[in-house]
Image (tube, rainbow, N blue to C red):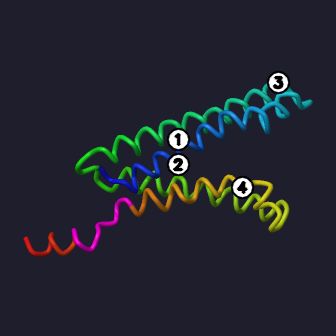
Amino acid sequence: MNRLMFASGVVVAGTAVVHLVAGQIDPVRPLLAATMNESSKWTLHACWHLVSADLVLAAAVLVYLARNDDPGIAAPRLISAHFLAYGLVFIVIGLTSAGPRGLVVLPQWVLLLPVAALAWAATVPSRRHMLSASVT
């Protein structure tokens, strides 16, 4: 089992739970109570749950791949890039909206960037593996 990849899947699963539970309280309930046209409100609500689905599916894929003897590197690196992009979006929006305080107001990057790092690290062969591969 690839422990780093499994850990990244567990972090994503935890992030999905936080997203689904805490996210329903803030910001989904205030969003649904806001005064705006129904189409915009429902579209934003649907987008929220697109992210919910994305998090759950990413967790499932990472855990599945972690259990494979040879998961390859393409899928985990794609997921890594995906979560790096998610994390950077929160950092950029936070900083441009509120300066350094924005990193506290939008702390989602704290959960997203470790997933990117763990998923990528899971694809890097260890020195021991590289040495044994070069001998054969």
Does the magenta segment cover residue 114? no
The residue positioned 50% from the left and 58% from the top of the image is 116
Q: Nearer the viewer, residue 71 or 131?
A: 131
Q: Which mark is residue 107?
A: 4
Instruction: Give how far apart the Cα atoms at labels 1 and 4 are.
Output: 17 Å
In the displayed structure, does residue 61 sit left or right of residue 95? left
The residue positioned 41% from the left and 45% from the top of the image is 62
Q: From the viewer's perspective, is the residue at label 1 or at label 3 nearer? A: 1
Residue denoted by label 2: 11
Instruction: Give how far apart the Cα atoms at labels 3 and 2 are.
Output: 34 Å
Q: Quadrant of the C terminus?
A: bottom left
Q: Residues within 10 Å of mark 4 (few under 14, many from 20)?
A: some
- Residue type at mark 1: give it: Ala
- Residue type at mark 2: give it: Val
Query: Measured from the top left, where is residue 100 in percent x and y?
Result: 80, 68
Q: Are marks 4 and 2 in contact (CB under 8 Å)?
A: no
Residue denoted by label 3: 38
Q: Are marks 2 and 1 in contact (CB under 8 Å)?
A: yes
- Residue type at mark 4: give it: Pro
Segment colored magenta: 122-129
Q: Which mark is residue 13?
A: 1
Q: Tell me if residue 29 comes above or below residue 78 in the rendering.
A: above
